[in-house]
Image (tube, rainbow, N blue to C red):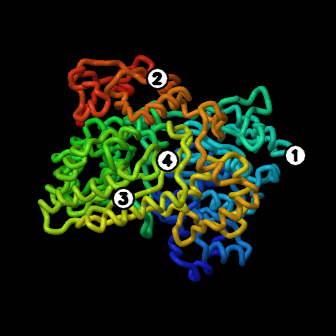
Amino acid sequence: MNSIWPQLEPLLATVQKPARYIGCEDGAQQPDHRPDRVAWLLIYPDTYEIGLPNQGLQILYEILNERSDALAERTYAPWVDLESVLRAQGLPLFSVDTHRPAGAFDLLAFNLSAELVYTNLLNCIDLAGVPVRAADRRPEHPLVVAGGHCTYNPEPLADFLDAVVLGDGEEVVGEITEVVAEWKASGRTEGSREQVLRRLAQVPGVYVPSMYEVTYEGEHLAGVTPRHPDVPALVEKRTIADLAEWPYPKRQLVPLTEVVHDRLNVEVFRGCTRGCRFCQAGMITRPVRERPAAQVDDMVRRGLARTGYDEVSLTSLSSADFSGIEGVVAGVINDPECSGQVSVSLPSLRVDAFTVSLAAEIQKVRRTGLTFAPEGGTWRMRRVINKLIREEDLYAAVEAAFSQGWRRVKLYFLIGLPTETDDDVLGIARLAGACAAIGRRHHRSVTVTASVGGFVPKAHTPFQWFGQNTVAELRRKIGLLRDAVRSQAGVTLRWHDPEATMAEGLLSRGDRHMGAVVEHVWRAGGTFQEWSEHFDLSLWTAALAAAGIDAGEVVHRHRGRDEALAWDHISASLHRDFLWQDFEDALAEHGLEDCRWTPCYDCGACTGLGVEHMVASAVAPAGGSQGTGQDLTSAGSVPVRFLDGDSASLARAGGGR
C-alpha cells in the first residue's frame, strides 16, 4: 500500500511535537517493499521520545534490513492528540520511515519493557485496523508478536498476541521470517493462519498462546498445556552466546528532536550474576556475556564519528562490572580524536565497583548523572534481597563522587520487600542523610535524592511466590519516610505512585483472565498508563469488578511452593528448585555471592549453552566476601567461563573491578 503522508502532513501542524512522526533520522532506512520480502513493523508502545533510544528495537531494525528476504520499519504509540486526529480522519497507524499503513505489514512486532503499556499495545493494534483479539483475525491480517522482558509472563496478553518471542531476538527473527515467507508464498489461503501459527510454535523460543489450553481448579490456575503433540510443553528462551558476533547497532538512529537518553549507546555485556532476588532482568538474562573490549572501543569510536554525539553510555545491567571498565572509559575520554570533549556515563552502577579512579576519569569532561541503587535501607534487608552492599561500600562510592566534584547523587530504593520492617524503611532516610553529610564535607551545598519504588514480584525470580504490599501499606511506609527526611539536610525524597505499583502487580502476576481487564481499561480510554497524568486506578478497579477478579488474590496473596504459576510453561533456563531455595535463603537472611567468584549454584542458566564455571588461581575481586561468612579473598577463586571448550569465547578473569 502507498504512503499516507499526503493525508498526514497537513494534520501534523495541529498536534504537539510533530517531529515525533516524520522520521528522517540519521540512520533511518527506506526499505524496498516487494512481495518476496517479509515486512516487519517494529513497534514501541510508548511515545517516540521514550521508544527511539531502545537498543533492542534498533538492533532488530538493522538485522532485518540486512536480510534479502525481509525488511523492517518502525513506529511508536501516537500521543493522544494525534490518535484523536487519526480516528477522526479515518487514518491508520503508520510507520515513521515511509508512512505506510501498519496493516500493510506482515508482522506487527512489539517491544514490551513495562507492563503498564499493555493498553497502548491494544490501542496500536486497533489503530492498525487489525482485530484486537487474535481469534478474530483472518489470513489477510498481520501477525501480532511481542518480545521483551514483560513477555516472561505473557498470559495477560495471550488473547491479543499471535506469538511471543522469549529471550534474545537476533537469531530468532530470521527463523520467524523464513516461516512467514513460506506462508506468504503459499498465498495465505483460508485456514492457513492456524497452520503458520503451529509452525511458529515449533521455532525454539517462540510461544504461540492459541496452541495451549488453560485449565483451572476452582478460581486458581491448574496449568497451561499444549493442544498438539508437536507443540512444546515448555518454551525455552533464546540466548545469544557470543555478543562479538552481533556488533549492533552499527548505525544508531540520531533523532531530529529531543528524546530521552539522547547519546551514543553501546552495549558492553548482557546478563548479571549478582543474584539480586527482586531483579527479573538479572535473572532472565543469565549468563553474563561480555562484548570484547576491543569491539566496545571500535563501536564507540565509529559511533561517535558517525553520529557527532559528545556523550557515550556504556550500557548493561551493571556497567562497572565490565572487565577492564576503567581502561575503556579512559580510552574514550583521553582519545586525541575526541579532543577531550566526549563524556562517558555508566548506568546501573554498583557501589562496590565504583572507585575514585573511575570517578576521576568520568568527570574529566563533564559530570554526567550519577545514580546508585542500594535498594534496601539496612544491611539485614540487603541480605534478604541479596544486594550485598555494606554501608561502607556506599559511603566509599559517595565519597569518591563528591571528592571528584559531584554535588548531586541519586539513590534508588525499594519498599514493600519480603520481611521488611519499619526500621528497614527508616534505614533509607538514615543512609541518605549520611550520604548528604559526606557531601557537605566537600561542598557547602549538596543534594542526595532518595527515589523510592514499591516492590512488584516478578516472574522467574526467587520472590515470585511473595505477595506484594497493599496500596495502603505502601502509602504508610512512604509517610514514615517523608517524616524522617524532614530532619535530613540535603535529602530529597521521590516516590512511585503506590496505585500504579498495584496495577503493575496485576499484570506482572496475572494469568489469562487478566486479558479481559486489560481490554476493559483500554476500551474505557485508559492509554498511557505509564504516565502519571494519565494513570487512573479507578479504571483498573472497575475492570476487575467487571471481570469478577479479586485484586488481593492476584497481587497480595502469597503463593505456595507447588502452586501452578501463570508462567510455568515459560522457561528462563532457571531451575524452579533453585529459585525456591533462593527464596528460602532470603527469608533466612542468607546472602549468596556472585557466582563468578564462587562455585556454581546450579541455577540452570549455563547448562543449555555448554558454559561451565572453571576455578582458576587468582586474587578475588574487592568486596568478594560480603555477607555469607565465606572468605573469598583467602580462597582466591575467580572463575573463567568456557563455551564449548573455547576459552576465548566467554573467558573473563575478573580484571578492572
Name the element at disc 3: loop
**Residue that badge 3 annotates:** 263
**Which residue sits at x=77%, y=38%?**
217
Mark toward the start of the polypeptide (2 vs 1): 1
Q: Residues within 10 Å of mark 1 (few under 14, many from 20)?
A: few
Task: Find residue 59 and name its label.
Answer: 4
Mark toward the start of the polypeptide (1 vs 3): 1
Amino acid at dot 3: Arg
Question: Is residue 69 at all visible to an observer of this figure?
Answer: no
Contact between labelled residues 1 and 4, with CB atoms less than 8 Å apart: no
User: Where does residue 311 sit, x and y in percent of width and height?
Assistant: 30, 58
**Which residue sits at x=15%, y=56%?**
404
Which callout, 2 or 1, points to the residue nearer the camera? 2
**Residue that badge 1 annotates:** 190
Q: Residue furthest left?
A: 441
Task: Find residue 602 and name its label.
Answer: 2
Q: Nearer the viewer, residue 166 or 585?
A: 585
